[in-house]
Image (cartoon, helix red, strand yellow):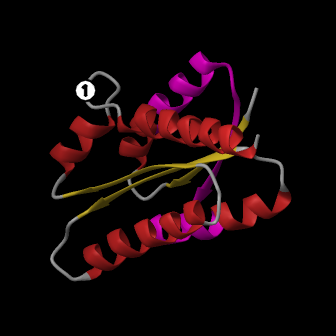
């Protein structure tokens, strides 16, 4: 049984609740324990994962959040830099499932977050577990 940390950027609470439902359902179904920590926004997710990884208490991580395009360049900065930070951590050997949605509008976010539709939270949890299994495979 693995211990998974879910790091969520809780900017859009109602959307994050849907993503969390998917993640927790997938992790529970797979028999893994999990904890959740909340950070202010998507830019803080990689930093929180890096800090948690230093403790050695977690086997894998799930990054969650929603970034919706607005009228300014901020969308690109947040989308790109949060993804870059998560990718850098995976290249350092951490098993991370990236469930940060980057969408044009709330309707797209809802469709991707709901377990009955695209279930991107559940997919992120499964990706984290797949990367953890791959890390174990290559460690032996």
Report the residue at 29% width, 21% height from top.
116
Judging by the rendered image, the residue that carries numbered circle 1 is 117
Vertical comparison of 138 with 114: above or below: below
Task: Tell me: 117 left or right of 60.
Answer: left
* Residue 54 screen position, x and y as percent: 80, 64
Quarter of the image for the N terminus: give it: top right
Q: Which region shows up in magenta?
A: 20-48
Residue sitting nearer the eye, 16 or 5: 5
Residue 138 part of the magenta segment: no
Front residue (pair 38, 79): 79
| Main secondary structure along the magenta-highlighted residues | helix
Q: Specify whether 118 is left or right of 59.
A: left
Task: In the rendered view, tell whether residue 109 sits above or below residue 113.
Answer: below
Neighbour tally class for label 1: few under 14, some 14-19, many 20 plus, Cα within 10 Å:
few
What residue lies at 20% left-to-right and 66% top-to-bottom? 69
SS class, disc 1? loop
Front residue (pair 136, 74): 136
x and y percent of residue 77 in the render?
Answer: 33, 79
State which quarter of the image contains the C terminus: top right
Q: Is residue 10 left or right of residue 114?
A: right
Q: Quadrant of residue 2?
A: top right
Question: Residue 1, relative to residue 81: is it above or below?
Answer: above
Instruction: Report whether residue 46 is seen.
Output: yes
């Amino acid at each position: 049984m693995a211990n998974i940390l879910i790091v969520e950027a809780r900017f859009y609470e109602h959307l994050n609740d849907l993503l969390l439902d998917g993640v927790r359902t997938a992790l529970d179904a797979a028999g893994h324990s999990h904890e959740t920590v909340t950070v202010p926004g998507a830019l803080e997710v990689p930093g929180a994962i890096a800090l948690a990884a230093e403790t050695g208490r977690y086997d894998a991580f799930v990054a969650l959040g929603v970034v919706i395009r607005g009228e300014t360049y901020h969308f690109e900065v947040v989308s790109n830099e949060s993804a870059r930070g998560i990718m850098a951590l995976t290249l350092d050997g951490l098993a991370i499932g990236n469930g940060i949605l980057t969408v044009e509008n709330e309707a797209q976010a809802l469709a991707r977050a709901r377990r009955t539709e695209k279930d991107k939270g559940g997919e992120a949890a499964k990706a984290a577990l797949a990367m953890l299994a791959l890390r174990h495979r290559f460690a032996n």
